[in-house]
Image (cartoon, rainbow, N blue to C red):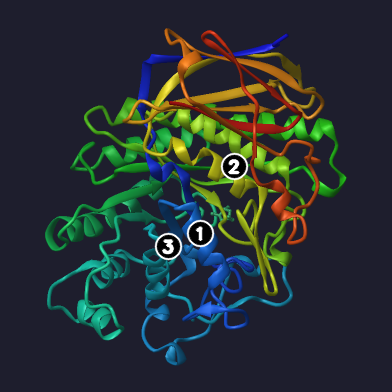
C-alpha cells in the first residue's frame, strides 16, 4: 500500500532547466586545484590529472566557476599568466586563517590553464574578478586578455602565451562575498563598487568583444541585504538598466554536524536545512522583481552544499563524502527544478577534494563520491522543460528546527521529444516508502519505462573512499505499472530517476 503520491502536472510548465544549473565551483583552496585538478605526481595530460579529467568529462559539466571564493578577492590574474617559471609566488591571505603553515600560491595554474581545462572537458568558464583588493582596470584588462580578438598588447600577450583565438569567456563575477571576505562591505558600498566595475566591464562587453558577456553580482542569503544592494545599484544614472544579468546567493548547510558522530536526528536536520534553499531562492527572486521591473535578472546559487565540522581551513576544508550529503544534493536539485523560471545557474562547492566535492583523490586514486552519482542521475533534466509536481508525503517533526521534514520529494521535466523524467527521493533514513507516481491526464501503461535507484542498502553516513566507491553506482529499479499509476518502493535514504517515453 503506497503511503506517498507524486502527481506530475504536464500542462503546468515552469520553464527550461538551464543546463548551467548543474554547474561547479573550483577554488585555489586546499587540494582542489593543486593535486585535485593539476599535478605532476600522477598520470597527467600537460599537468591536468587524467583520472579527474575523465570523471569530469563523463559528467558533462556545463559551467565551472574559478578562482574563488574568498581567494578571488585576493587574486591578481597577471600573476598567473606567461612562462610558469617566471610567475611570482604569493601568500594566500584568506585561507591562511587558523593555520601555522601559511599556504603559498605558486601561480602554476592560472588563467590559461583554467581555460584550457574548460576546453578539455567541454565546459563554459565563469571567472570571478577581484573587487575586494583589485580595481576595475584589472578586471577589464582580464576580460581583454581572455577574449579580445584585436591588436592590443593584452590580446597579443594571450597569443604569445599560446592562445591565438579569444576564449570568449561568457560569465564574469564582480567579486565574491563582498559582504564578508571580499571587503566587508555594506550593501550600499558593494552596490557602488558594482556600478564602478560594471561601467568598465560592461564597456568591454559592448565595445570590444564579439559576443555577449553576462555580469554577475554577489548577493547574500539575507533578503534585506539584497534589497538594499539592488536599490542602491538602481539609484545610479542608468536606473535599473545597469549591466547586471544575475544576482547570486550562497547556501551552505550541515555546519553543526560532525559526520563521524552523527545520528538520525542530525540527518533530518541537515535535510531540513538543505531544503531552506527554496525559501532563499523565492526571497532573492522577489527582491529582484521588486526593483528590476524592466529587466530579467537571473538567480544564481554560485556556492552551495554541505559544510561539516570536519572541514576547517587547516585541512583545506576536507570532509567525508557520504550518501547523506548526496541525498541533500538531490533535494536541492529538485528545488532548483521547481524554480526553473528564475534559476540561471548553480555551482556546487567544490569540484574536487573540498567540501561537498563530487570527486576525491588520494595519491594515484580518484573516485566519484555519492554526490557525483546524484548529478549523473539528474543529468536527463538538463535542458528539459520543468513541470510542476505535487507531492503528498508523510512528514517528520524535526525538533531542532522550526520545520517538518517532508520524507518524500520529487521533481519532473519533459524533453523536446516528449520523454518525461521524474526524480523521486526518499529522504527518510528510518524507513522505506511506497510511492505512487502519476502523470496527470496520461495513461502510462503502454509507455517505455526505465528506472534507476541510488544507494539502496547503504549506510547514510558511511565514508566513501577508493575501496568502496563503485558500490554507489545506480541499480535498476522495479516499477509496478497499473493503468495510469506507477509505484516504486524506495528503501531508506535513496533516490530514483524514472524516465517515461
Ligand atoms: O567554498 C569555500 C568558501 O566559502 C568560499 O571561498 C567562500 O566564498 C565561502 O564563504
Location of mark 3 (residue):
121
Location of mark 2 (residue):
374
Depth check, front residue: 494 or 24: 494
Q: How far apart are the alpha carbons under marks 2 and 1?
A: 14 Å
Looking at marks 3 and 2 on the same chain, the residue that comes earlier in the sequence is marked by: 3
Query: If the picture is divided into quarters, which one holds ligand 1?
Result: bottom right
Relative horizontal placement of residue 455, taking residue 63 as reference (left or right): right
Location of residue 405 in the rendering, given as x and y in whole percent from the top left corner: 70, 22
CB under 8 Å between discs 1 and 3:
yes
Q: Crowding near pointer 3: few (<14 within 10 Å), some, many (20+)?
A: some
Asked which secondary structure carries label 1, the reply is helix
Determine whether the beta carbon of the residue marked 1 sits less than 8 angstroms from the nearest atom of ligand 1.
no
Note whether 45 is above or below 10 in the view shown. Answer: below
Q: Is residue 69 visible?
A: no
Q: Residue at x 48, y 68 (%)?
A: 74
Q: Residue at x 33, y 27 (%)?
A: 289
Location of residue 319 in the rendering, given as x and y in whole percent from the top left corner: 73, 55
Location of residue 481 in the rendering, given as x and y in whole percent from the top left corner: 58, 15
Determine which of the numbered discs, if any, sits on residue 284 in the image.
none
Q: Crowding near pointer 1: few (<14 within 10 Å), some, many (20+)?
A: many
Q: Residue at x 74, y 26 (%)?
A: 428
Q: Is residue 317 visible?
A: yes
Note whether 500 is above or below 119 in the view shown. Answer: above
Location of residue 65 in the rendering, given as x and y in whole percent from the top left corner: 44, 57
Q: Crowding near pointer 2: few (<14 within 10 Å), some, many (20+)?
A: many
Determine which of the numbered discs, if any, sits on residue 56 in the image.
1
Asked which secondary structure carries label 3, the reply is helix
Note whether 221 is above or below 108 in the view shown. Answer: above
Quadrant where the C terminus is found in the figure: top left
Looking at marks 2 and 1 on the same chain, the residue that comes earlier in the sequence is marked by: 1
Q: How far apart are the alpha carbons under marks 1 and 3?
A: 7 Å
Relative horizontal placement of residue 250, taking residue 117 as reference (left or right): right
Amino acid at each position: 500500500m503506497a503511503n506517498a503520491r507524486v502527481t506530475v502536472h504536464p500542462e503546468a510548465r515552469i520553464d527550461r532547466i538551464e543546463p548551467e544549473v548543474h554547474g561547479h565551483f573550483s577554488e585555489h583552496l586546499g587540494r582542489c586545484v593543486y593535486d585535485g585538478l593539476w599535478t605532476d605526481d600522477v598520470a597527467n595530460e600537460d599537468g591536468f590529472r587524467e583520472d579527474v579529467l575523465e570523471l569530469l568529462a563523463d559528467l558533462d559539466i556545463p559551467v565551472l566557476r574559478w578562482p574563488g571564493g574568498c581567494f578571488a578577492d585576493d587574486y591578481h590574474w597577471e600573476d598567473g599568466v606567461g612562462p610558469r617559471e617566471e610567475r611570482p609566488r604569493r601568500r594566500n591571505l584568506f585561507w591562511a586563517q587558523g593555520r601555522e603553515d601559511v599556504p603559498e600560491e605558486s601561480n602554476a595554474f592560472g588563467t590559461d590553464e583554467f581555460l584550457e581545462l574548460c576546453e578539455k572537458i567541454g565546459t563554459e568558464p565563469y571567472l570571478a574578478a577581484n573587487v575586494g583588493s583589485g580595481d576595475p582596470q584589472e578586471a577589464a584588462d582580464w576580460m581583454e586578455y581572455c577574449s579580445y580578438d584585436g591588436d592590443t598588447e593584452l590580446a597579443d600577450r594571450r597569443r604569445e602565451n599560446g592562445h591565438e583565438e579569444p576564449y570568449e569567456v561568457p560569465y564574469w563575477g564582480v567579486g565574491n562575498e563582498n559582504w564578508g571576505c571580499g571587503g566587508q562591505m555594506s550593501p550600499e558600498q558593494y552596490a557602488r563598487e558594482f556600478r564602478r566595475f560594471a561601467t568598465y566591464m560592461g564597456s568591454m562587453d559592448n565595445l570590444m568583444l564579439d559576443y555577449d558577456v553576462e555580469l554577475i553580482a554577489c548577493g547574500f542569503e539575507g533578503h534585506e541585504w539584497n534589497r538594499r544592494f539592488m536599490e542602491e545599484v538602481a539609484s545610479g544614472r542608468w536606473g535599473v538598466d545597469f549591466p547586471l544579468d544575475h544576482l547570486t546567493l550562497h547556501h551552505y548547510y550541515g555546519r553543526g554536524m560532525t559526520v563521524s558522530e552523527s545520528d538520525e536526528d542530525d540527518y533530518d536536520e541537515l535535510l531540513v536545512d538543505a531544503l531552506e534553499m527554496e525559501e532563499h531562492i523565492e526571497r532573492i527572486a522577489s527582491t529582484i522583481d521588486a526593483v528590476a521591473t524592466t529587466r530579467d535578472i537571473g538567480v544564481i546559487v554560485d556556492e552551495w552544499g554541505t559544510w561539516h565540522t570536519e572541514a576547517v581551513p587547516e585541512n583545506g576544508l576536507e570532509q567525508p563524502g557520504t550518501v547523506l550529503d548526496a541525498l541533500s544534493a538531490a533535494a536541492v536539485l529538485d528545488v532548483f527544478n521547481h524554480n526553473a523560471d528564475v534559476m540561471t545557474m548553480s555551482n556546487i562547492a567544490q569540484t574536487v577534494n573540498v567540501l561537498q566535492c563530487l570527486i576525491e583523490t588520494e595519491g594515484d586514486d580518484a573516485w566519484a563520491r555519492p554526490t557525483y552519482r546524484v548529478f549523473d542521475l539528474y543529468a536527463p533534466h538538463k535542458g528539459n522543460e520543468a513541470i510542476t509536481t505535487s507531492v503528498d508525503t508523510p512528514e517528520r517533526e524535526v525538533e531542532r528546527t522550526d520545520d517538518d521534514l517532508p520524507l518524500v520529494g520529487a521533481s519532473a521535466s519533459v524533453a523536446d521529444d516528449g520523454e518525461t523524467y521524474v526524480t523521486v527521493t526518499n529522504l527518510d533514513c528510518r524507513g522505506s516508502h511506497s510511492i505512487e507516481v502519476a502523470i496527470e491526464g496520461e495513461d502510462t501503461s503502454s509507455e517505455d519505462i526505465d528506472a534507476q535507484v541510488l544507494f539502496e542498502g547503504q549506510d547514510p553516513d558511511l565514508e566513501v573512499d577508493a575501496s568502496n566507491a563503485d558500490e554507489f553506482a545506480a541499480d535498476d529499479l522495479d516499477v509496478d505499472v497499473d493503468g495510469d499509476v506507477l509505484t516504486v518502493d524506495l528503501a531508506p535514504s535513496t533516490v530514483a530517476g524514472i524516465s517515461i517515453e
